[in-house]
Image (spheres, grey):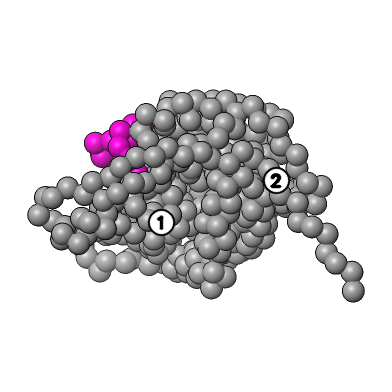
């Protein structure tokens, strides 16, 4: 039997380190033994410069990346072709794909929420803290795509400000040490200790130089930028979700995607490999993180295309159900919007379609009588209507991702 060829690394400069000393405060909240275990010497990360680095992409890795980019572009074209470029459902389809990506990215941070609660949160009708956090991540993604053409520090701060809107340090680089680990008391023993606060801005300046390059395959560019961002950990909180939004800013800004592929769903299927790839990047081999993003891209394109098809077929069935309603009725304009927002109320329709209350209520009645919507509260006031078919498809997709993991 022949031997497999050696797996060549994608070499990057490994991170350096800076030594510090940590003392757990005697504030009455930690035991003496906990203070003793948490007090001592630690080493923070000093990110290696990436901005002007040369990269020797191994041939087989370059082929893997090219294949992944091809299927991503095919997914993008499929979404438009399945509905038609002028179809009023294309915008809502983009919205639901963006929301699916945001939910998967949030789930990587253990923020899990079902499609119903997320749709309710978009109407400010949910009491779920996780749902509100995912809606904030949706706003972060929207900001990332809106600002994709000019990824400067202000743009990245704006993304973070959307994610943590209302928090004291939203949209601000951190002023304290942060780490990835189980202990909130001390960085000792942490999986990753981020740079000291004074090292963050120089590292971000280098990252911004790297983001401005145009000499790399888009998926490689996005994977390396993400790994560097997570190494810097520039914020006190929300680094993972902001860093994955940055990926989509690059995929969009560099022209690979016009809609949102659920790449985080692909990462979510193997979190251990994703975490190990970030560790390998810091040790000097970027190949694993590029491979993880290529794998996640293929997963996103394949499963995302099925989700687009399922939602488009649901829309076709709904059009048949609505066939008895006159073509100029508002219900026909509401129908494609339900893909992007499968729970609605009269106020939402009034705002979105700029129609009077009575017109919105009539459309809801027609959609309910046609079996498309169901009133979900049983109340006489503050009612909401839901599309159980679309909610079921979105929950089924999330369940598929969980099973894959």
Q: Could you tell me which residue is drawn at 42 percent across and 31 percent down? A: 200
Residue underneath mark 2? 10
Asked if residue 311 lies in the magenta stretch, the reply is no
- Compare residues 234 and 282 and report the one nearer the observer: 282
| Residue 184, percent from left and from top | 28, 54
Which callout, 2 or 1, points at the residue further toward the start of the chain?
Answer: 2
Q: In the shown orientation, is residue 351 left or right of residue 334?
A: left
For label 2, the SS is loop
Q: Can residue 11 be seen from the camera position used here?
A: yes
The percent coordinates of residue 183 (x first, y second) are 30, 57
Secondary structure mainly formed by the magenta segment: loop
Vertical comparison of 392 with 200: above or below: below
Q: Which residues are magenta?
A: 167-178
In which quadrant is the N terminus drawn? bottom right
Residue at image coords 48%, 42%: 231
| Label pair 2/1, CB-CB below 8 angstroms | no
Residue 109 circle label: 1
Is residue 149 visible in this depiction of the protein?
Answer: no
């Amino acid at each position: 039997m022949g031997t497999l060829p050696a797996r060549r690394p994608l070499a990057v400069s490994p991170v350096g380190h800076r030594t510090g000393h940590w003392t757990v405060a005697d504030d009455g909240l930690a035991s003496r033994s906990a203070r003793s275990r948490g007090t001592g010497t630690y080493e923070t990360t000093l990110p290696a410069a990436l901005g002007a680095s040369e990269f020797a992409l191994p041939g087989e890795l370059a082929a893997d990346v090219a294949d992944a980019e091809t299927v991503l572009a095919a997914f993008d074209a499929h979404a438009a072709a399945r509905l038609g470029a002028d179809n009023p459902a294309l915008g809502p389809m983009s919205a639901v794909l963006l929301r699916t990506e945001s939910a998967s990215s949030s789930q990587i941070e253990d923020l899990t929420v079902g499609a119903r609660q997320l749709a309710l949160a978009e109407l400010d009708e949910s009491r779920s803290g996780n749902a509100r956090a995912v809606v904030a991540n949706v706003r972060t993604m929207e900001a990332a795509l809106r600002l994709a053409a000019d990824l400067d520090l202000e743009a990245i701060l704006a993304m973070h400000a959307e994610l943590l809107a209302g928090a004291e340090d939203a949209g601000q680089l951190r002023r304290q040490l942060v780490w990835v680990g189980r202990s909130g008391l001390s960085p000792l023993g942490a999986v990753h200790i981020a740079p000291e606060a004074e090292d963050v801005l120089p590292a971000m300046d280098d990252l911004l130089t790297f983001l401005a390059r145009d000499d790399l395959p888009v998926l490689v560019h996005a994977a390396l930028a993400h790994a560097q961002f997570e190494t810097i950990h520039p914020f006190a909180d929300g680094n993972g979700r902001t860093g994955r939004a940055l990926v989509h800013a690059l995929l969009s800004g560099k022209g690979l995607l016009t809609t949102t592929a659920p790449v985080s769903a692909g990462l979510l299927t193997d979190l251990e490999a994703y975490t190990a790839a970030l560790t390998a990047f810091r040790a000097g081999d970027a190949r694993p993180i590029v491979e993880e993003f290529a794998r996640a891209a293929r997963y996103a394109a394949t499963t995302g295309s099925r989700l687009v098809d399922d939602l488009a077929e649901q829309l076709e069935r709904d059009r048949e159900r609505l066939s008895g309603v006159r073509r100029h009725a508002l219900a026909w304009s509401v129908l494609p919007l339900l893909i992007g927002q499968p729970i609605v109320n009269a106020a939402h329709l009034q705002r979105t379609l700029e129609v009077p209350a009575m017109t919105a209520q009539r459309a809801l009645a027609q959609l309910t009588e046609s079996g498309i919507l169901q009133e979900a509260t049983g109340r006489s006031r503050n009612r909401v209507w839901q599309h159980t078919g679309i909610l079921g498809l979105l929950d089924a997709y999330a369940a598929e991702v969980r099973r894959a993991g």
